[in-house]
Image (cartoon, coloured by chain):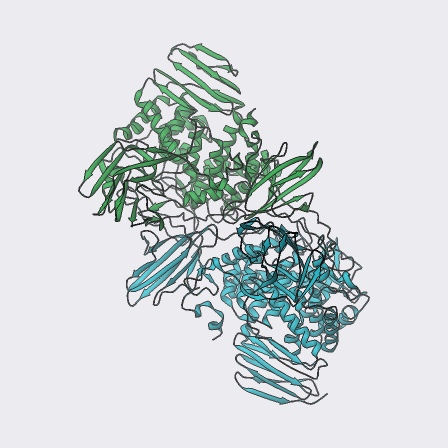
Chain colours: A cyan, B green
């Protein structure tokens, strides 16, 4: 049942490719749409390519002869039982009996893909793929032993019709109108009412000359021609219109839709004298996703936080989970792992998770950390652990395991004599954007904690893949490192893990990062966890966190320590604070100390900050996991816990998606109602003494009363 | 001077790219043109891709402001001193003073390339390129230290005009007519008089229906519809013509040129009833190359061997040096190293050598031996040694050294406890096509000899690249292996190196391969070399060689041992034998014992053999190196030897190309005339006692008399 929901094999046929290849290609398309003031702005890390030649194969055993249709993106050949067929056959009759069917495709520009449809023969991810078939023949024409060929299960998504070419994929669009127009001396500002994303449409164009377009996530930004982050310039000629940034010319019509999408709420349109723009609208662009998670409670501010969080998530859930829609529009591993986690409580769209994980990994050889950032490499490993836990998808783990190995080889090749990582040439040790000094030298406790968890993930995935020797190796490495963590970083004086160790010497600095992660990884005993709650997490003298990114983990750690009431207050203060500043989506960074336009600035630029950043949406995750309290305890929600906690609310209700459907929960100060559609749940009902476990079976409605403490 | 001739920097500006990337892309285009009876037949090894995003950079120091024009293949941006420019500028003014100019290009379908032209600013291979610039900025907007970025010198060829887009490169064409037409019941055979290559042209097309086209390197093949190796089928409709193999439809004209080139002498054109083909011609396709080497002597058969060899070389010297023009039309390392060596005595076209070496290496990670063949990996290393010796091009060695390292890492990762290679899963141990059993098990002496020379090449190239530690490492590995060769493989009983050792036990078999290579590598002392000359090389009981491929090395070994008269006889017998069979180009394999159509068969197919195979052309090399006797003794012919030997001829004259021009030589039984245009030559004049060395300075005409022995 879970398998049916998880796997593309549920469809009778679908376009298939070498796993990861379509994702890497589509990711290049996505990552290369970033612009900065009209200049193309590609990533600064290695961009990989799909395999240009891929062979697809399937072993057949037919009771009856069968006709198949074959479609491919690329130049291809077809071999039946080793015999090449003339040309590029579009249909074929396969005789009854056992046969080998091989299709080999070459495509440099877009990934080699195929689609095969017959009565029982259908392309799906049970087909095998290879990029190197090693099919030698000897002088007498005898084929060599091809046991050397490495096959993988094919990759797929949802391109289930012959006409749905994967390379032609686009997101959905919907026309949207501005809600207000503000007149300026040389043009007009169009207000779309909230943060949005898509293609600007200029209508009723008259005259000849330029039109300049300045986009703003804020009104200030749109009006600041010299410093707004994104802009467009178009030249209207007698018969053509040219997008000057992209150097693209199209025939002139009275309406013109820009071909690069942008993020904005406000757009300042400035036609040259002699040019008239009658009307401005937009094509909103989005990935069609179902909102399967939900949350409502008695607190309207919290409801709004959830709604704006969900909208922020939807805006940033596109071809891939990106960081922000104005900037960078890139896929970043540390950002993505949070999107995945929010996704499990909102869309539960596995395909988006898998696409993003493939893209972030790219191809061998590994030449740098993921996105060049050491911590982001570790978040990439951790995200596979999370994905497997939530989805139960072992096929994906098997497909990606070889690239996990080579990524870990890279990491292990850069450890010191203690098996710890230190920033080396080319490593960006990021941790967080902090309003204060963060030492990046030597062994950071934060990085070692993440490395240790990454090694545990390797052991788990090696085990799933059937690589028992590897599993043992990684387990041992994880244990060795784990044994060194406390001796290296715990300070009795500070009653906390210190920030780093340089040349074997603990530093004086204590930061929140390692202490937070050690807590919810259960790397410290319960006593020490309670100690750092007070010495670090709730201690205002420790450098505060001003990004929703690290706030995610800080609040998660406090929830794990049972501080739901405190976290609820923090959520309302912090995300409520953004709402009070007029946010219509959540930001990259928010420091309540700042005022006015200070909120817009970052990276030394007045509008450098992204006002719609995926990592801003974490209440989605916290409310689902720690208030509704639903989380898997075995892969794919075969078993799961429900530990509902009001955290000061009067009532709440909501749904959490699972591979089986949804878990519905209502709770007020006296009753709990639960209904689930699969897996074996354990509801922990509050009692006067603590909690009492009750088994929740699928498809039954439960109602429990519980005593007020 | 040498530098000027070698380097594209001699041109004021040229299109540039990431070194190897254009070559890999163009190689995929080439390797994917093979067909087998109308089916697309791509390689079975991993095909790599160019880097999709490349940054080009140049540090400038301008006395005057300067306008530049910029062209690129791909979407690009331009940064001047770190500041992104709007759009994709086609011209720019660079102010006087010191500046950094960076151009970043994205192109998935074809390699990112640029062309910059100004007064002093010109794109050439002094520009730096990277695929990963690691240009982080921190939260305050400060750029990170980018010392982590790895830069390479840019690659280029001869695209020196802005309009000569590298991705649009095609070979030259020339119309050719058949010399005879043979009527058949259902069609006509067109005879082009000799082996040729290009696009068939059907003229005066009338009617509607199919035309079937059967190509033959021999008349037998063209006439055998069921077994000829290549064929085409076209469908002529009322308004269109479709190439059925390629599934390409074009508007109907009275003349139709096929869009895939083929190799043939004979073409059998069979129109369906109702279709008429009035005339057939072809577009001969070739790489424009200058015949700088030449050879003439009193023996007309030898002159014809040289001419047919040169033609065979020209037919197979295309975008790359390929194996054969009918089949495989692929780039194979063992074949290519011989093409390079012949090229040094014919065209001396360094660009073709470099292109082919880049393509054969591809990209990391290394997942198999070159072309999957163990020996071909070693020939790849050796070819770089040869190229450096003939050309003196150290820039190329520096560019390719990192990929030599990863290739050697792959090899060393597959050595046994004795540091020797044995065939492992996925390794094709080829050696040669032999008319007899060749054992491929265990440690083959042949493979160890090649590995040892490869390690010596690594040491040399590490040294050129300035990697002194690497040089020491590889030298030591080479010495260790060298010390083991004789103990492992020399048999006093056999008076030869045995073929292989299995589980530490010498086998009984003696083959020519290792003994030949050990001879001209000077891996055995002169005494042992003379021993194996008789015990192996001139011993008819040792399995004979029937490919011109290994005959190349066999005859080279005999020349190295001074057996010029015997080799001359062999050349005339073997290559003359092919001429007597009607060869108009030299073959993949020739066994004088075979008769008639046996000569056409190979790989279990009646016309499987290639009748135009590069490795068939080796007399070009032997005559230049061992009879005219010219060879470099220092990189790039800074010094060189001339050791002319008539080998039984009455007289000979010819030229050998060098980076400086040519060495001209005439010799009869009394006099030697020499003229050279650069480098310091040493002519060894025969005396009654042996040879006498005379220095040959450039641009002087020398004439010497010498005594008849």
Figure check: A617 above or below B172 = below
Image quadrant where one finds the C terminus of chain B:
top left
Q: Residue furthest left?
A: B185
Residue A580 figure quarter: bottom right
Image quadrant where one finds the N terminus of chain B:
top right
Figure check: B357 above or below B304 = below
- In the picture, measured across the screen, residue B42 lies left or right of residue A381, that is left
Residue A338 figure quarter: bottom right
Is residue B452 in view? no
**Which residue is pictured at 50% across the width and 42% down the height?**
B22
Figure check: A77 above or below A571 = above
Percent position of residue A265, x then y: 66, 64
Residue B309 figure quarter: top left
Percent position of residue B385, x then y: 51, 33
Percent position of residue B54, x then y: 58, 45
**Which residue is pictured at 29% across the width and 39% down the height?**
B203
Figure check: B517 above or below B691 = below
Is residue B453 in view? yes
- In the picture, measured across the screen, residue A593 lies left or right of residue A178, that is right
In this orientation, which residue lies closer to the viewer: A704 or B199? Answer: B199
- In the picture, measured across the screen, residue A236 lies left or right of residue B308, that is right
In this orientation, which residue lies closer to the viewer: B354 or B201? Answer: B201
How many labels were placed on the picture? Answer: 0
Percent position of residue A423, x then y: 69, 52
- In the picture, measured across the screen, residue B418 lies left or right of residue A122, that is right
């Amino acid at each position: 049942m879970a398998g049916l929901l998880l796997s593309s094999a549920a469809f009778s046929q679908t376009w298939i490719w070498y796993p990861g290849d379509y994702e890497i290609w589509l990711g290049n398309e996505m990552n290369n749409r970033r612009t900065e003031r009209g200049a193309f702005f590609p990533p600064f890390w290695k961009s990989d390519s799909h395999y240009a030649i891929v062979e697809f194969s399937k072993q057949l055993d037919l009771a009856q002869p069968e006709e198949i249709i074959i479609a491919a993106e690329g130049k291809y050949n077809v071999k039946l039982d080793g015999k090449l067929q003339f040309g590029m056959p579009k249909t074929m009759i396969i005789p009854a009996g056992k046969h080998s069917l091989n299709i080999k495709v070459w495509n440099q520009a877009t990934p080699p893909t195929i689609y095969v449809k017959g009565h029982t023969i259908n392309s799906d991810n049970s087909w095998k793929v290879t990029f190197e078939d090693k099919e030698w023949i000897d002088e007498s024409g005898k084929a060599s032993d091809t046991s050397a060929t490495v096959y993988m299960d094919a990759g797929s998504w949802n391109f289930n019709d012959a006409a749905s070419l994967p390379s032609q994929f686009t997101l959905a669009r919907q026309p949207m109108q501005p809600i207000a127009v503000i007149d300026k001396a040389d043009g007009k500002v169009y207000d779309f009412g909230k943060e949005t994303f898509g293609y600007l449409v200029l209508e009723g164009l008259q005259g000849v000359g330029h039109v300049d377009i300045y986009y703003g996530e804020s009104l200030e930004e749109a009006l600041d021609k010299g410093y707004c982050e994104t802009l467009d310039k178009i030249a209207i000629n007698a018969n053509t219109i040219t997008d000057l940034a992209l150097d693209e010319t199209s025939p002139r019509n009275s309406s013109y839709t820009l071909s690069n999408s942008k993020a904005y709420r406000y757009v300042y349109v400035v036609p040259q004298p002699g040019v008239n723009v009658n009307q401005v609208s937009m094509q909103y662009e989005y990935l069609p996703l179902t909102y399967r998670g939900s949350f409502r409670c008695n607190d309207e501010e919290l409801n709004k936080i959830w709604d704006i969080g969900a909208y922020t998530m939807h805006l940033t859930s596109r071809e891939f989970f990106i960081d922000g829609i104005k900037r960078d529009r890139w896929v970043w591993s540390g950002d993505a792992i949070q999107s995945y986690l929010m996704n499990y409580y909102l869309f539960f769209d596995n395909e988006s998770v898998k696409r993003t994980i493939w893209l972030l990994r790219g191809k061998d050889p590994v030449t740098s950390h993921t996105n060049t950032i050491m911590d982001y490499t570790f978040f990439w490993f951790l995200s596979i652990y999370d994905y497997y836990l939530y989805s139960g998808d072992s096929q994906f783990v098997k497909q990606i395991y070889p690239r996990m190995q080579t990524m870990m080889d890279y990491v292990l090749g850069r450890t010191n004599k203690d098996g710890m990582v230190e920033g080396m040439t080319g490593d960006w040790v990021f941790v967080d954007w902090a309003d204060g000094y963060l030492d990046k030298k030597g062994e950071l406790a934060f990085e070692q904690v993440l490395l240790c968890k990454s090694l545990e993930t390797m052991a788990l995935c090696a085990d799933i893949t059937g690589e028992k020797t590897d599993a043992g190796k990684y387990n041992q490495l994880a244990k060795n490192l784990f044994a060194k963590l406390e001796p290296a970083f715990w300070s009795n004086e500070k009653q906390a893990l210190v920030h780093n160790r340089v040349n074997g010497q603990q530093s004086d600095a204590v930061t929140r990062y390692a202490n937070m992660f050690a807590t919810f990884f259960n790397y410290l005993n319960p006593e020490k966890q309670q100690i750092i709650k007070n010495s670090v997490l709730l201690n205002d003298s420790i450098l505060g966190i001003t990004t929703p990114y690290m706030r995610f983990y800080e609040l998660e750690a406090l929830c794990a320590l049972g501080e739901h009431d405190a976290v609820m207050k923090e959520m309302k203060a912090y995300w409520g604070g953004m709402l009070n500043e007029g946010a219509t989506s959540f930001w990259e960074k928010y420091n309540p100390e700042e005022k006015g336009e200070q909120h817009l600035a970052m990276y030394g630029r007045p509008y450098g900050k992204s006002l719609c950043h995926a990592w801003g949406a974490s209440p989605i995750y916290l409310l689902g996991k720690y208030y509704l309290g639903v989380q898997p305890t075995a892969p794919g929600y075969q078993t799961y816990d429900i530990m509902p906690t009001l955290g000061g609310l009067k009532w709440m209700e909501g749904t959490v998606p699972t591979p089986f459907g949804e878990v519905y929960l209502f709770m007020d100060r006296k009753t709990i109602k639960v209904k689930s559609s699969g897996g074996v749940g354990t509801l922990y009902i509050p009692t006067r003494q603590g909690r009492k476990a009750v088994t929740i079976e699928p498809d039954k409605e439960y109602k429990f009363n519980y005593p007020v403490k």
